[in-house]
Image (tube, helix red, strand yellow):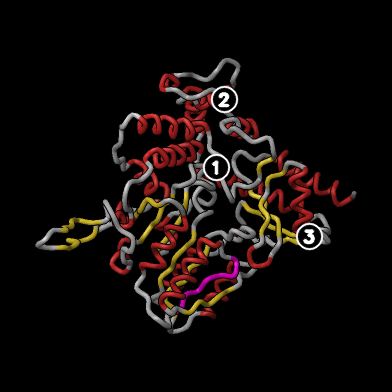
Amino acid sequence: MKANRRKFLQQLAAGSAWAALTLSGKAWTAADEKATSPPGLRLPITDGEEFWDEVRRQFDLPTATYLNTGTLGLMPAPVMATIQSQFESLSKGKYAIDEGPRQAIADLLNAPLNSISMTHNTTEGINIAAQGLQLKRGDEVILTDQEHVGNALPWLNRARLSGLRIRVVAPGQTAAETLNRINALITRRTRVIAVPHVTCTVGHVLPTKAIAQLARDKNIISVVDGAHGPGMLFPDMAALGCDIYATCGHKWMCGPAGTGMLYVRPELLPKVDAVMVGAYSDTGWEVSMAQQRITGFAPTAHRFDYGTQNVALEMGLKAAVEFMSQIGHAKIRERILDLAAYLQGRLLERPFIEMLTPTEPESRGAIIGFKVKGKTIKEVEQWAYSNALRVRFVAESGLNAVRVSSHIYTNHADLDQFVNELDDWMRA
């Protein structure tokens, strides 16, 4: 472990302009690929806050205290450098399809390469599933009452177009309670269980592995909105066992917006029609006077890729995957879950807090959601902005709550500042 950590920190010092971008803010150039870290930068080789302080320095943090990774993750210097260099190549007409990003995602998710489609966001992946699954009028789909619009709208739209029935479950405060509630909703018409891995509202981690097994046992398809999975929980598709998992690069992976990934279990591919198609979806096609046809579709999840992709952004996503891997997935997960538990513990000590995120460790991720008693969401919003605190205000499901996200560029001082400012406000 120490050898790996030392290797990572050496890469921070000598990598492609990581420290140079972070500390100087100058524009990246190809010459910076050989640049070493600027004088005066000392990289630790021990665990603890010193290590995380150096990781934090790889990000160009905003002046406000940033606690909103659940909406948009900040990008570290190597990701920014990669995107800029790739756009420079594109501006000179250098364009080539690179399978490196797809392979990086397959490795990240521990999934076969042929099961990965490169999309633009989580919502696109969910739409591919919602529109492509072979469902008919009267079939039932189970959703939660804590959905992001990106999982709710695709299924509501398919229900509108095909006459499906949506059934809704409220997650419980424990994994067992949530699983039991979903099981109670299943009928002979249930065809899909489509739930978030982590709710966008209060960060509730659903027991997706148990849900997927329940679905498999009853011949039901499991679809997971995984927008908050990779980069926080680092799910393993082989272990998770779900049929479809849609996610993105711009949140916890600290990659660029406009990048997404869709996993489709290879055995399920024949049951998911390719609705939107284009270049790279097919095995051949012809439009001539004599014949008009599609010869066939790609025998892999690549069939859901269509048209020209943004190579610069996809390579930026690959750089983000590499950045996370160099730090260590288990190390990241432990760090950010500990930060969230620390914040939840401090908030629970305050009588004016109504905690919405479960306290059960397996049902709690790196997002903490709560209400401030006696305050409207508008009042809380004005207070946060006036104190340069970047959080997310949750209107979904009528919650009118506050959501705080902790990531690898967050430290205890950020969370203490948030709680202390809240205390001062409530005392005023």
Dot 2 crowding, Cα within 10 Å, few <14, some 14–19, many 20+: few
Residue 88 position in % (x across, y down) = 39, 29
- Per the image, label 2 sits on a secondary structure element best described as loop
Dot label at residue 376: 3
Of callouts 1 and 2, the N-terminal one: 2
Q: Is residue 18 left or right of residue 201?
A: left
Q: Residue at position x 54%, y 47% from top?
A: 252
Bounds of the magenta segment: 140-146
Dot 1 crowding, Cα within 10 Å, few <14, some 14–19, many 20+: few
Q: Is residue 152 above or below residue 117?
A: below
Q: Is residue 358 above or below residue 156?
A: above
Dot label at residue 80: none
**Residue type, label 1:** Lys
CA separation in Å, label 3 and label 2: 39 Å
Of callouts 3 and 2, the N-terminal one: 2
CA separation in Å, label 3 and label 1: 37 Å
Dot 3 crowding, Cα within 10 Å, few <14, some 14–19, many 20+: few
Dot label at residue 25: 2
Residue 316 position in % (x across, y down) = 43, 38
Q: Nearer the viewer, mark 1 or mark 2?
A: 2
**Residue type, label 2:** Gly
Q: What secondary structure predominates along the stretch shown in magenta?
A: strand
Dot label at residue 331: 1
